[in-house]
Amino acid sequence: MNSHPQVRTPAARRLTRRATTAAIATVLAVTAAPAATAGTGRAEASTGKAATGAGVDQGAPEYYDSGLAPTPYMGWNTYYGLGAPTEKEVRSVADKLVSSGLRDSGYDVVWLDGGWQADNPRDAQGNLVAHPDRFPSGIPALVSYLHKRGLKAGIYTDAGAYDGGKSCGLGSRGHYDEDARQFAGWKIDAVKVDFLCGIGAKLDPGPAFKEFSDAVAKSGRKMLLNLCNPLTDDWGVPHTPEQDAHNSYVYAPTIADSWRTGTDIAWGTPSPGQWPNVLRNMDANAWHPEAQGPGHYNDPDYLIPTRPMSDGSLELTEEESTTQFVMWAEMASPLVLGSDPRTLSPSMLRTLRNPEIIAVDQDPLAVQGVRVASDSVGDVYSKVLQGDGRRAVVLLNRSDKPAERTVRFSDVGLGGAVDVRDLRARADRGAHSDTYTVEVPAHGTAFLKLTGADALPGTSLGQKTSASPAVVRDGDSLTTFLRGPHGSLVQHTTTSDGNGRGRTRDLGGPTGGRFLGQPAAYASAGGRIDVFVRGTDSRVHRRVLADGRWGAWQSLGGRVTDAPTVAFTDPGHWTLVARGTDGEVVRRGPSTGWSSLGAPDDRPTYGRPSAAVGSDGRIHVAVRTAADDVWTRTRTAAGEWSPWTSLGGTVSGSPTLVTAGNTVVLYARAADYTLWQRRYEDGAWQGWTKRDEFPSAAFEGSLGAVAGAAGPDGTAGVDAVYRGVDGRVHLTSFTRTQSK
C-alpha cells in the first residue's frame, strides 16, 4: 500500500511509527472499547450505511463525539478577516452573517481567535481576562449578543504555557481545568486550542491536547473542541514527527471534534500566490480520510474566499475560492469562513450559501471524499452519500488552462444509466453511461451528484448484515455467517458461485440471542463447522455444527473488546486471538487459558486481529495499530514466537488473513476505501498490491475469506464475502491475478 499516491512515502511512514510510540501509548491507552459495546468508528463512517445497533467490527475504537457536531460544523473565525478582533467588529460581522443568509445556511459559530485576551491575559486570581479596549463589555456580554441572534460563540486558547508573548498571546497549560470551567461559565459553545506556545516549549501535542480535552469533559458544559497544531516542515523549525500536524490523526480522533491536518493555509494579511497553499492543505488533508467520521473531522483550515489585498486585487479569484469551498465540502471538512463576510461580493455569498454544495458537506455519513483518479492536469474525487447508488464527484483542474475532465462511473462504483446533476449550477445534466465529460475552468471544479446502481464485485447474497461476515467451504457449498439486523447469528448456505438458491437459518446468539462484531467460522472433516463470536458480555463463545446438528453455545471466557479470530488447524488444535481490554492481543487454545501476545511497541491495537495457519504450520497474527498500519507476529511449528514486524500501509479496517495452498494472503481496506493485499510466500511477505475489482467505497470493514478453487495457473484461489456499501453480503472469488 505504500505505493498508493495518497499514502506518505515509506521512509516517512517508518519515521512516523517510531516517533509516535510514546504519544500513542499515553493518549490512546484509554480507548479500549467499553465491556458491553463493540468498537465502532472510522470505517463504519467511511462508506455508506450507518451501523444497525452496536457491534459493528470496523477496526477502530470508540471515537470522540461531543454530540455537538454530528455533521461538520460551520461558522466564521476572526483570524484571517480581522486579525486581533474588536467587540464592535465581531458584532458587525455577526449581524452580516444573519442579514446575508449565511447563518440560516449553517454558518452559525462566531469564533474569536487570538487577540481577544488582555495584554496580560490573567488577573491576580489567575482568571483569563478580555482586552479592556477591544472588548469593553467583556466576553459574556458578547456571547449573549450572539446567542440572541441564533449564533454560537467560540473562543481561542493555547495548550502551551504563556511565555510572556514570545510565542503566543495566552496559554492554558497549568490552568486547563480552570480555563475550561471559565469558558463554560461564559456559556462558550466551541473552543479552539492552538499550540504556538506548545511548539515554543517543544511539547508533544498529543498528551497536552488530551489533558485539555479531559478538562472540557469536566467543565460542566458541552463545548465543541478544535485542536490546532500548525507545525509542519513549512515552518523550518526542527521537530519530531509526533510534533508534526500531519500526524495529528494518530491521537486526535479520540479526544476532539476536529484537528488541523496541516499548517496555516495563508498569512494573516492577504498576500499574492496563495492558490498553491490551498492545494497544499487540500492534499495534506487527503492523506488520512480514514481518521474521520461523524463527530470527528479532519480540518484543513479555514475558507479564505476572495480576500482583498492592499492594491484592491483579490488573493484568490472567485473560481479559486469556489474550488476551495467545493473541495472542503467533498472532504466533509468543517466549513469555517476566514474572510470578512462584509467584503464578499453577492455572487460569492450566493456560492457559499449554495444548499446543494452544503448538503454534500453535511451528509450524515460524514464520509471524506477520496481521490479515485489522477493525471497531470488534475484529479477525480468521489464521496459516498447516504442512500443507495449516490456519489458526490469533483473534477478538479489544477492547471492554468481550461480542460476537459472525465469521470468514469466504474471508478466511483456505479453502473448502468447514471443520472448527473451539476451542483454548482443546480441543474440536471441527464442520464449517461460509462463516463461523463465536461470542460472545467483553470484552477476550477465541476461538482456533480451521480445517482445510479451500486456496481459491486461478485454476487449479492441478498442478506442484510450489521457487521462484516465470515465464510467456510464444504465441497461445492459455501456457508456464510453474518450478524443480522437484530444482532443474531445468521447462517446462509449457497453454491460457491453464489447463484444457487440459498438456505438461511437464524442461530440466535450466546447472550440474549445476540452477539457483537464479525463472526469467525472454520470448517473441518465430516461437515463440522466451529463458529466463534464475541457475546454482548464481551466474552468469547463457540458453537459447533457436528453430525448435521448445532450444539449449544459454549463460553470460552476472556474479556475482549472486539471480535475474535482463530488460527484453526482442526477442532483439537487452534489458537484464538482477540483484542484485550487495554488494546493488547490476547490468545487461548482448546485446553489452555488466556494469555497476552502484547502489541507492537506496546501500543494499543484497533479492531479485530486476524490469524491463520500456513501450510508449514506457522501461525500468523496481523493487527491494525493506532497509526493505521499493519503489523504481524508469527509462531513457528516449534512454538517460538517472533517479534512484531511492520508491514506498513495505511488501512481503514481490520486486516484479514487466509491460507490458500502454500500462501498466506493478507487483505485490508486502504485509507481510500479500496482493497489491497500482501502475500506471504517463500518465507517472506511480498509487497502491497491493489485488487482492481474493488473500486473505492465498495465495501465496509473487513473481508471474510476461505481458500477457494485453483486458478488458471494452478494456484489456490480465495472465496471472499464482504459487507457492501448497500449493507448486504456479497460473494466474490479471487485468483492470484491482480493489479500492481
Image (spheres, rainbow, N blue to C red):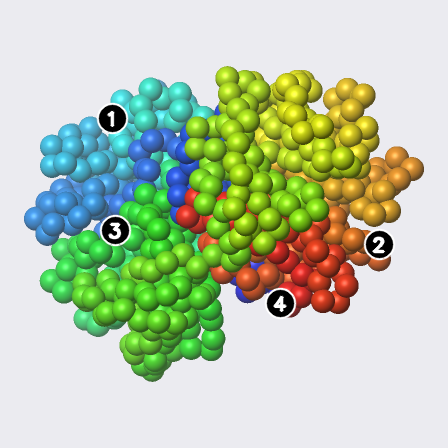
From the image, tell me which residue sits under label 3. 359
Which of the 4 quarters of the picture holds residue 146?
top left
SS of the residue under disc 4: loop
From the image, tell me which residue sits under label 1. 186
Badge 1: residue crowd in 10 Å (few <14, some 14–19, many ≥20): some
SS of the residue under disc 3: helix
Q: Which mark is residue 595?
A: none
* Front residue of 86 and 7: 7
Q: Earlier in the sequence, mark 3 or mark 2?
A: 3
Q: Horizontal placement of 639 versus 409: left or right?
A: right
What residue is at 21 percent from the left and 36 percent from the top? Answer: 152
Query: Alpha-carbon distance for marks 3 and 2?
Result: 51 Å
**Does the image show residue 7?**
yes
On the image, the x and y values in percent for residue 412 come to 42, 62
Do the residues under discs 3 and 2 have CB atoms within 8 angstroms? no
Query: Alpha-carbon distance for marks 2 and 1?
Result: 63 Å
**Does the image show residue 168?**
no
